[in-house]
Image (tube, rainbow, N blue to C red):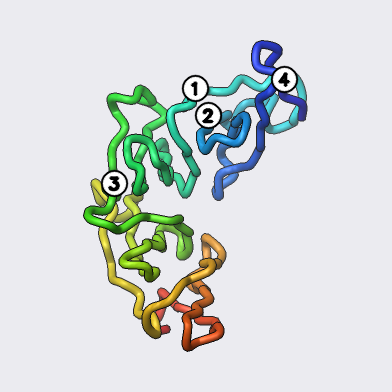
Amino acid sequence: MVYTNPEAPDEICDIDTTYDYKYLVMTISKGTESKNKVYIANFTDPAVKMLKGEIKFQKLIDEYIGAFSLLQTSGSKFYFDTNFNAPRGKVIEIDINKPQQKFWRDIISEPKGTEVAQGSHVVNNYTLIVKYMKDVSDVLRAWQLPNESNKLSEAKMMFEIPLPGVGSVKRVTGRYNESMAYFDFASFTNPGCFFGLDFAENSL
């Protein structure tokens, strides 16, 4: 697939799909600034399905107003990790049937005080693990994202994941459709250890 925009030759695009393979997602950025645009295309479009012909993208976010990273979808609802109007980070919901900015909703608000959200990872379909920096130490919290089965209007904080002490979490991994999440932890007194968290058993 080839994408070009003669009016903005310095733009760089990245193509991915939603986890359910219903949408093609194009993230567009330029330069080194942490801002991007997001376009989507439905796989029911024959041009998308066959990757043949001109694909008609819906310009979901068409301004460089912040960084937007797609986390998960539920029906027409798209959930993004973003710093838009939230320098310490938050998670928002955009309904692609009502994509205007006035309809965007915060489902995990920007943290208060000195906490900073530093990234999120989806496992167990709609479980979101968010890493926060709090008082020079990392904190992990598990949230339940809204979806068509739980009927939540916003994300629900499930619990804070216990860590061995004050330190840093380098990364959180795991497949979006499996119950296991993994993370590695290190501190001044701990050179590094690897943990697995099973959301099916709620065991670490």
Which residue, given by chain and number where applicable, does mark 3 sit on?
Answer: 107
Q: In this rendering, does residue 125 appear at all? A: yes
- Front residue of 62 and 152: 62
Residue 95's place in the image compared with 59, above or below, is below
Label 1–label 2 contact, CB within 8 A: yes
Residues at marks 1 and 4, CA–CA distance in whole angstroms = 15 Å
Residue occupying image coordinates x 52% and y 29%:
37
First-in-chain label (3 vs 1):
1
Residue 160: numbered disc: none
First-in-chain label (1 vs 4):
4
Which residue, given by chain and number where applicable, does mark 1 sit on?
Answer: 62
Q: How many marks?
A: 4
Label 4–label 3 contact, CB within 8 A: no
First-in-chain label (4 vs 3):
4
* Image position, residue 53 (x, y; %): 75, 20
Tell which tag, 3 or 1, sits nearer the viewer. Answer: 1
Residue flagged by tag 4: what amino acid is it? Thr
Which residue, given by chain and number where applicable, does mark 4 sit on?
Answer: 4
Label 2–label 4 contact, CB within 8 A: no
- Front residue of 72 and 102: 102
Residue flagged by tag 1: what amino acid is it? Asp
Residue 131's place in the image compared with 86, above or below, is below
Residue occupying image coordinates x 42% and y 40%:
78
Residues at marks 2 and 3, CA–CA distance in whole angstroms = 20 Å
First-in-chain label (2 vs 4):
4
Callout 3: SS: strand
Which residue, given by chain and number where applicable, does mark 2 sit on?
Answer: 37
* Image position, residue 128 (x, y; %): 40, 59
- Front residue of 74 and 170: 170
First-in-chain label (2 vs 3):
2
